[in-house]
C-alpha cells in the first residue's frame, strides 16, 4: 500500500508538470496559419491566412508578414488581427514551407505558424501506347506518362479492355504497362483498350482518360527466339545448322538465316527451295554450302511470323553461333618467280660436277591454304636424263618463316624442272608452281654493275635507289654450236624482263629470314626506286638482288639472282684513300705495274667509278721534276700498267679513287726506278718461255693419245667370224661390187688364219697404247 501511494504520487507530479508546460506554451502562442498543409495544382491560386488568436498579444496585423525560406512574400491586411497571402497562378517553384512572423514591440521577430504547400501538375492522358504479342501466347501494352509528376504516389492508372461485349480490367497492371499472360490472352482477337490516369489527394480526385485504342493482335506478334542452335561442319565447304523453337509449334512462321565472316557485315543465306516448314515441328535445320575451306564463320537465326503467307509482326531476337569449315588441301600453289633461285657456289665450270642451288618462294595465300601448312614437297628432275628426286621442306612458322630449300643437282650441264607443292594436315595440293633451273652454259648473264644506293640524308629511311647497265645481246649467252643442243633444243632467245628480289636475311648464309618479295620490270628499264619497311638498312641483314629473264621458244630461262654486296651512299665523294699501294715485281724495262687494295663496303660507302693513277719523274728527294701524267683504271680494277716509261728514271706514283661526286683523298706516294734489263735477264726469260711451250705441247699430246686410246677400247665391234656368220655371201658378179670409189679396186678378203685369230679393236698394240 505504501508502494502504491508512492507510484501514484509520482504519476500525479508528472501530469501536473505536463499541464503546466501546455499552459505556458498556450500562453506564449501568438496565433495560427491556415489552411493546414494545402495541396495546389499547377495554375490554380494559393491563399494562406495568418491570425493573431492570443488576446494577450499587444501587436496587430501591421506587425505580421509571410516568408518562404528567406524570401519575404507580399500580403494584405484583412483586419487588425489577420493578414492574407495570395499567389494567383501557382507554379511548381511555389512549393515549399510558408511561415507567418510577427515583430514584437521589443523589436524581436516571433513565429506565428508554418504551413507546407505542395504543388503538382494536373493529370494528362498517357502517350506512346504500344502493344506487342510475344510468341503468340502473351500480350503486353506499355505507355508513357505525358508529364513527370512531382508526387507520383498520388497518381493511379487504370486500364479496361473489351473483345466482345464484356468490359474487363487489366489482369497485371502497373503505372506504365498492362500484361496479359497465357491464361488471359486470346490470340487473333481485336482488343479495344482505354487507359485512365487519376490523381487522388486529400479525398479529392482528378481523372484524365485516353481515347479508345484498338489493337489487332495478328499484327503484333514477336516470336520467341530459337534455342539449342548448333552448327557442325559436314565437309570442307558445308556447315549444317540445327535449332529448336519453344512451345508453340503450330503457328505459321519462317526463319531468317544470316552468315558473315568475323568483322564483316551480315548477309542473308539464300538456300534453294526445299520442303516447306511444317508448323507442328519443333526441330529445324539448314545446310549451308559453297563456303571457304578451313575458315571461321558466324551464323544467326531468327523467327519471322506469318499470316496467310505474308509477314506479320516482327522477327524474333537473333541467336548467334560460330563454326569452322573443315580443313582441306590448299587450292593454290605457292608464289614463285622465274628468277627466284641462285647458285650457292660461284664457280661456273662447264663440267659434270654437282651443283647446289637455292630456290625461294612465297607461302600460299591464307585464303587458299584451307588449313595449317605443314610442309612443301619439292620435286625436281632433269630434262636431258632420267634423273628425278624429291624432298620435303617443313613449315615451322607459316606467317613469318622464310621459304627456301637447297637442291643438290647432280650435274651442271643439265636443265632441271622444279615443282613446289604445298600441303596441310589433310594432304598435298593438286596445284604446283614450276620453275626451270637452266644448265650453267644455258644461263643468261645477269645485268652488270647492279648497284644499291641510298641518300646521305635518309640513312634512317627504307628508300633505296637501284641501277644497272642496260641489257643488250651480250647479256644473253648463246650456245657455240648446234652440237651442244640437247634433245629439247631452244631455237631462239629474247629478253623478256627483269626481276628485283629482296628480303630480310643474312649475307653470311645468303638465306632469307622472311618471305621474299619481288617485282617484275620491263627489259629496257635500268633504274628502280625500292621502298621497304626496313630502316637503318645494313648490308648484312638485308638482301637485294636482280635477275634477267629470257624467252627461249616456249620456255622461260633466268639468270638466277645476282645479289648486291653493298649499299652505297649517293652523291658522296670517297672518304678513304686507296690502301696498300705497291709495285708488282712483274715489270718490263719501260713499264711499271701498280697495285692497290679496293676498300670494302664498310670502309667506303661511296661507289668508286674509276681510279686515277698519278705519276711523274722524280728527283732524288722524291719530288716531281717532269710532267704529271694520269692513267685511268676502272672502279673494279686493283692494278694497272704504266707504259712507255723512260729507263733509268725514278718515278713517283700515287692513286686516287673517284666517284660520281668527285675525287677522294690520294694514297701515299710510292717510288720505283725503271732500269734497263741485262742480256742475261732477257735470255733467261726467253728460256722460260720456250720451256713452258714445250711442257704445254707434251700435255696436249698426252691428252689426245689418251682420249683416242680410250675411244678405241670402248668400241664394241663384232668379229669377222660374226660378220661372216650374220652376213652370208651374196651371188653377185665381180664387176657389180658396189662401193663409193668406182676407180679404186676392192680390198682382198682376209685370209683364213687372220679370220681365226684376229678380232677388231683388241690388238696387242692397241692395248699397250691405251695403257
Image (cartoon, helix red, strand yellow):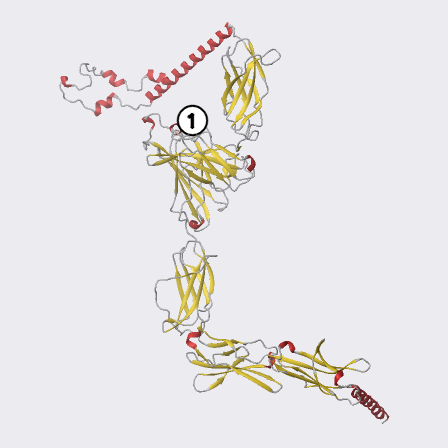
Determine the image quadrant of residue 149. Answer: bottom right
Nearer to me, 429 or 226: 226
Regarding residue 711, the answer to whether it shows in the image is: yes
Q: Residues within 10 Å of mark 1 (few under 14, many from 20)?
A: few
* Position in image of residue 308 (x %, y %): 36, 74
Is residue 549 positioned above or below 758 on the image? below
Residue positioned most to the top: 679
- Total numbered circles: 1
* Position in image of residue 78 (x %, y %): 70, 87
Determine the image quadrant of residue 421. Answer: top left
Q: With 679 as the anchor, is 551 left or right in this view?
A: left
Regarding residue 771, the answer to whether it shows in the image is: no
Is residue 535 positioned above or below 283 on the image? above
Q: With 737 as the anchor, is 555 left or right in this view?
A: right
Q: With 350 as the anchor, is 401 left or right in this view?
A: right
Q: Which residue: 27% across, 18% down?
A: 757
Residue tagged 1: 349
Q: With 671 as the anchor, is 445 left or right in this view?
A: left
Amino acid at each position: 500500500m505504501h508502494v502504491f501511494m508512492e507510484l501514484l504520487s509520482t504519476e500525479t507530479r508528472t501530469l501536473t508538470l505536463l499541464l503546466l508546460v501546455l499552459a505556458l506554451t498556450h500562453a506564449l502562442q501568438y496565433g495560427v496559419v491556415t489552411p493546414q498543409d494545402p495541396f495546389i495544382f499547377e495554375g490554380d491560386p494559393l491563399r494562406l491566412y495568418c491570425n493573431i488568436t492570443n488576446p494577450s498579444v499587444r501587436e496587430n496585423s501591421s506587425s505580421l508578414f509571410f516568408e518562404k525560406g528567406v524570401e519575404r512574400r507580399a500580403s494584405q491586411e484583412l483586419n487588425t488581427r489577420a493578414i492574407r497571402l495570395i499567389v494567383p497562378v501557382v507554379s511548381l517553384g511555389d512549393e515549399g514551407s510558408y511561415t507567418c512572423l510577427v515583430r514584437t514591440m521589443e523589436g524581436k521577430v516571433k513565429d506565428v505558424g508554418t504551413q507546407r504547400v505542395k504543388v503538382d501538375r494536373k493529370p494528362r492522358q498517357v502517350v506512346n501506347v504500344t502493344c506487342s504479342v510475344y510468341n503468340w501466347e502473351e500480350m503486353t501494352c506499355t505507355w508513357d506518362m505525358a508529364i513527370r509528376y512531382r508526387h507520383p504516389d498520388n497518381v493511379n492508372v487504370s486500364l479496361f479492355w473489351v473483345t466482345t461485349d464484356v468490359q474487363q480490367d487489366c489482369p497485371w497492371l502497373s503505372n506504365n504497362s498492362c500484361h496479359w499472360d497465357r491464361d488471359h490472352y486470346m490470340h487473333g482477337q481485336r482488343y479495344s483498350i482505354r487507359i485512365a490516369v487519376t490523381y487522388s489527394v486529400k479525398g479529392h480526385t482528378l481523372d484524365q482518360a485516353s481515347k479508345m485504342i484498338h489493337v489487332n493482335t495478328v499484327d503484333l506478334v514477336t516470336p520467341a527466339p530459337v534455342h539449342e542452335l548448333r552448327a557442325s561442319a559436314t565437309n570442307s565447304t558445308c556447315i549444317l545448322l540445327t535449332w529448336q523453337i519453344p512451345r508453340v509449334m503450330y503457328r505459321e512462321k519462317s526463319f531468317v538465316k544470316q552468315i558473315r565472316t568475323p568483322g564483316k557485315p551480315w548477309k542473308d543465306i539464300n538456300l534453294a527451295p526445299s520442303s516447306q516448314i511444317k508448323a507442328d515441328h519443333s526441330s529445324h535445320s539448314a545446310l549451308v554450302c559453297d563456303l571457304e575451306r578451313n575458315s571461321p564463320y558466324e551464323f544467326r537465326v531468327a523467327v519471322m511470323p506469318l499470316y496467310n503467307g505474308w509477314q506479320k509482326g516482327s522477327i524474333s531476337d537473333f541467336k548467334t553461333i560460330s563454326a569452322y569449315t573443315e580443313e582441306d588441301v590448299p587450292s593454290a600453289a605457292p608464289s614463285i618467280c622465274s628468277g627466284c633461285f641462285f647458285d650457292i657456289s660461284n664457280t661456273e665450270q662447264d663440267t659434270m660436277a654437282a651443283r647446289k642451288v637455292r630456290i625461294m618462294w612465297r607461302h600460299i595465300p591464307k585464303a587458299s591454304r584451307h588449313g595449317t601448312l605443314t610442309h612443301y614437297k619439292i620435286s625436281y628432275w632433269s630434262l636431258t636424263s632420267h634423273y628425278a628426286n624429291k624432298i620435303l621442306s617443313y613449315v615451322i612458322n607459316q606467317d613469318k618463316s622464310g621459304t627456301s630449300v637447297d637442291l643438290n643437282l647432280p650435274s651442271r650441264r643439265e636443265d632441271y624442272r622444279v615443282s613446289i607443292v604445298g600441303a596441310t594436315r589433310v594432304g598435298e595440293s593438286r596445284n604446283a608452281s614450276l620453275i626451270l633451273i637452266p644448265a650453267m652454259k644455258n644461263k643468261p648473264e645477269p645485268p652488270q654493275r647492279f648497284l644499291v644506293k641510298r641518300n646521305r640524308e635518309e640513312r634512317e629511311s627504307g628508300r633505296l635507289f637501284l641501277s644497272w647497265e642496260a641489257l643488250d645481246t651480250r647479256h644473253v649467252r648463246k650456245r657455240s654450236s648446234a652440237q651442244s643442243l640437247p634433245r629439247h633444243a631452244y631455237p631462239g632467245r629474247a629478253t623478256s624482263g627483269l626481276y628485283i628480289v629482296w628480303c630480310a636475311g643474312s649475307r653470311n648464309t645468303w638465306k632469307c629470314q622472311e618471305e621474299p618479295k619481288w617485282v617484275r620490270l620491263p627489259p629496257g628499264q635500268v633504274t628502280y626506286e625500292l621502298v621497304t619497311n626496313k630502316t637503318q638498312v645494313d648490308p648484312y641483314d638485308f638482301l637485294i638482288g636482280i635477275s634477267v629473264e629470257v624467252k627461249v621458244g616456249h620456255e622461260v630461262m633466268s639468270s638466277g639472282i645476282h645479289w648486291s654486296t653493298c649499299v652505297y651512299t649517293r652523291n658522296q665523294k670517297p672518304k678513304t684513300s686507296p690502301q696498300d699501294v705497291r709495285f708488282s715485281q712483274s715489270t718490263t724495262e719501260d713499264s711499271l705495274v701498280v697495285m692497290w687494295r679496293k676498300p670494302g663496303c664498310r670502309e667506303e660507302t661511296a661507289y668508286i667509278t674509276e681510279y686515277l693513277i698519278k705519276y711523274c719523274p722524280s728527283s732524288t728527294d722524291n719530288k716531281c721534276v717532269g710532267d704529271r701524267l694520269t692513267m685511268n683504271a676502272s672502279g673494279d680494277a686493283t692494278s694497272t700498267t704504266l707504259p712507255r716509261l723512260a729507263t733509268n728514271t725514278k718515278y713517283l706514283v700515287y692513286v686516287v679513287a673517284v666517284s660520281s661526286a668527285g675525287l677522294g683523298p690520294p694514297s701515299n706516294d710510292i717510288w720505283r726506278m725503271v732500269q734497263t734489263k741485262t742480256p742475261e735477264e732477257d735470255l733467261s726469260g726467253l728460256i722460260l718461255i720456250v720451256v713452258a711451250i714445250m711442257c704445254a705441247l707434251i700435255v696436249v699430246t698426252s691428252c689426245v693419245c689418251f682420249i683416242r686410246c680410250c675411244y678405241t677400247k670402248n668400241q664394241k665391234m663384232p668379229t669377222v667370224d660374226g660378220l661372216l656368220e650374220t652376213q652370208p655371201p651374196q651371188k653377185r658378179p665381180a664387176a657389180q661390187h658396189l662401193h663409193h670409189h668406182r676407180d679404186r679396186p676392192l680390198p682382198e678378203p682376209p685370209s683364213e688364219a687372220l679370220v681365226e685369230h684376229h678380232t677388231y679393236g683388241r690388238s696387242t698394240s692397241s692395248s699397250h697404247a691405251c695403257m
